[in-house]
């Protein structure tokens, strides 16, 4: 016997119902579904027996409202909701759990569409990055997604194999166009598989390069799988490294780059959030920006630099490492900071003699957060401490002294680098 005040969520689409799911469904007083799943369920043997108990609601808010109204009514129990595939895989299961609590739910999943998609193309999926771009049918009410279309090139560089749940806006051709425009990997080494209408009688699998997929159109629903092919991916080289780029891997000029050891400590000191806004002021060649953007693809990184040559290096590095979450702003701070999104973190690598004005403007814009300033001279150190304290920041200072080995007459000696003072100001 089914419990009262219970919501049974049954996944459909790919396999016949198992006995437990079938028994619950046949005893259900109310069966909720959408138009699309109603058409899918018509193919099931159980449809003829329960069709008079089916109620079609297409919008999630209306479905939730109906359940809230009926869940405590005995005449509605058992109450069943038909869902697509595995309801807990980017499905309605999470929303139901948030609204009604886990104890109210019993979920009986089918296979997920991603499982089916990988099976159709005979590829393993235990090493794939799985994401959803399904933001909902109403553009005005589209939910915020953990990852957006512009994150795909970075994620593909990091993982080499991605499965994407799509929708009408974030469709296969648009995904292919984004890859074409932003990914540095040769498209000849990429394969896109579009798995259309899995589980339907007219399902179709299309494989091609991003250039080929970009000019095609596809039926819904569909799943996209993007994979890198051939040697050189997912193994050695900068594209497989999340953190720890070497100076000679980053385009720069005349040695004007934050040295590896100092860059590591600086990024640690910044304590960057996964999301938010990070200003890299006086970004130089963009080494701090590049490492930050690669570490946190959902973080908006703003590289502010006045020098033409350095801006070209930032742009080249952004392209080289396939990071799409860097915004390059050419200009002199603090004027170049006006109009930018308020920062959560700021690194000041160069101030052009305007440190007091830059800190003052940041203090006005930053609600809570961290400023890190790298100082080479005692004068800049003292100025940074005084200006931060004057603006109400809690200040800490670290000195980084690095020596690197070099061979002299066949023997290894240590050569000292200039010490760097790392000044941290914390607000809030």
Image (cartoon, rainbow, N blue to C red):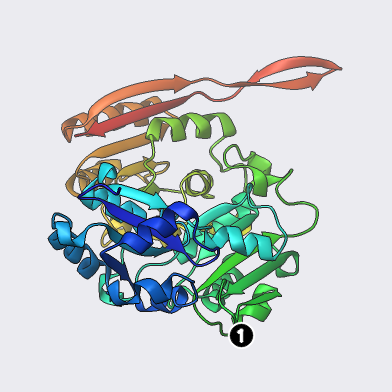
**Residue 39 position within the rendered picture, expressed as x and y whole percent measured from the top left:** 43, 79
- The residue carrying mark 1 is 215
Examine the rendering and report whether any part of residue 328 can be seen: no
> Residue at 48% across / 49% down in the picture?
293
Nearer to me, 69 or 297: 69
Q: Which residue is drawn at 61% across and 51% down?
A: 128
Q: In the rendered view, would you say 171 is above or below 355?
A: below
Query: How packed is label 1: few (under 14 Cα within 10 Å), some, or many (20 or more)?
Result: few
Report the front residue among 208 and 66: 66
The tally of labels here is 1
Q: In this view, does 173 lie above or below 75?
A: below
**Quick check: 376 above or below 143?**
above
Q: Residue 80 appears at what percent x and percent y? A: 31, 61
Q: Quadrant of the C terminus?
A: top left
- Mark 1, secondary structure of its residue: loop
Outermost residue, right direction? 410
In the image, residue 266 above or below residue 298: above
**With 14 as the anchor, is 206 left or right in this view?**
right
Q: Where is residue 379 in the image (x, y as percent from the top left)?
A: 35, 28
């Amino acid at each position: 016997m089914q419990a009262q005040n219970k919501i049974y969520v049954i996944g459909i689409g790919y396999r016949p119902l198992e006995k437990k799911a079938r028994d619950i469904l046949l005893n259900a007083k109310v069966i909720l579904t959408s138009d699309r799943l109603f058409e899918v369920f018509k193919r099931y043997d159980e449809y003829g027996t329960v069709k008079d108990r089916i109620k079609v609601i297409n919008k999630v808010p209306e479905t939730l409202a109906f359940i809230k109204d009926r869940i405590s009514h005995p005449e509605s129990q058992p109450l069943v909701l038909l869902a697509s595939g595995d309801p807990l895989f980017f499905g309605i299961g999470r929303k139901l759990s948030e609204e009604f609590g886990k104890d109210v739910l019993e979920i009986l999943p089918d296979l997920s569409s991603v499982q089916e998609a990988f099976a159709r193309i005979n590829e393993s999926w235990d090493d794939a990055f799985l994401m959803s771009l399904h933001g909902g049918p109403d553009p005005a009410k589209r939910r915020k997604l953990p990852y957006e279309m512009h994150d795909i090139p970075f994620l593909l560089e990091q993982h080499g194999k991605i499965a994407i749940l799509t929708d009408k806006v974030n469709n296969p051709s648009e995904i292919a166009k984004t890859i074409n425009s932003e990914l540095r990997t040769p498209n000849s080494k990429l394969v896109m598989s579009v798995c259309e209408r899995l589980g339907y009688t007219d399902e179709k699998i299309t494989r091609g390069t991003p250039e080929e997929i970009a000019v095609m159109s596809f039926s819904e629903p569909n799943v996209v799988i993007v994979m890198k092919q051939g040697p050189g991916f997912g193994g050695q080289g900068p594209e497989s490294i999340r953190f720890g780029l070497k100076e000679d891997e980053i385009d720069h000029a005349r040695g004007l780059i934050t040295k590896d050891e100092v860059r590591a400590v600086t990024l640690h000191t910044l304590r960057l959030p996964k999301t938010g806004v990070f200003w890299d002021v006086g970004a130089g060649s963009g080494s701090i920006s590049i490492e930050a953007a690669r570490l946190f693809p959902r973080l908006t990184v703003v590289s502010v630099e006045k020098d033409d040559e350095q801006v070209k290096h930032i742009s080249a590095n952004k392209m080289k490492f396939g990071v799409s979450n860097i915004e390059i702003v050419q200009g002199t701070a603090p004027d170049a900071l006006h109009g930018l999104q308020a920062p959560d973190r700021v690194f000041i690598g160069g101030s052009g003699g305007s440190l007091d004005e830059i800190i003052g403007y940041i203090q006005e814009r930053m609600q809570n957060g961290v400023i890190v300033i790298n100082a080479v001279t005692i004068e800049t150190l003292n100025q940074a401490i005084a200006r931060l304290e004057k603006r109400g920041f809690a200040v800490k200072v670290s000195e980084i002294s690095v020596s690197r080995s070099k061979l002299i007459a066949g023997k290894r000696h240590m050569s000292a680098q200039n010490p760097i003072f790392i000044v941290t100001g914390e607000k809030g």
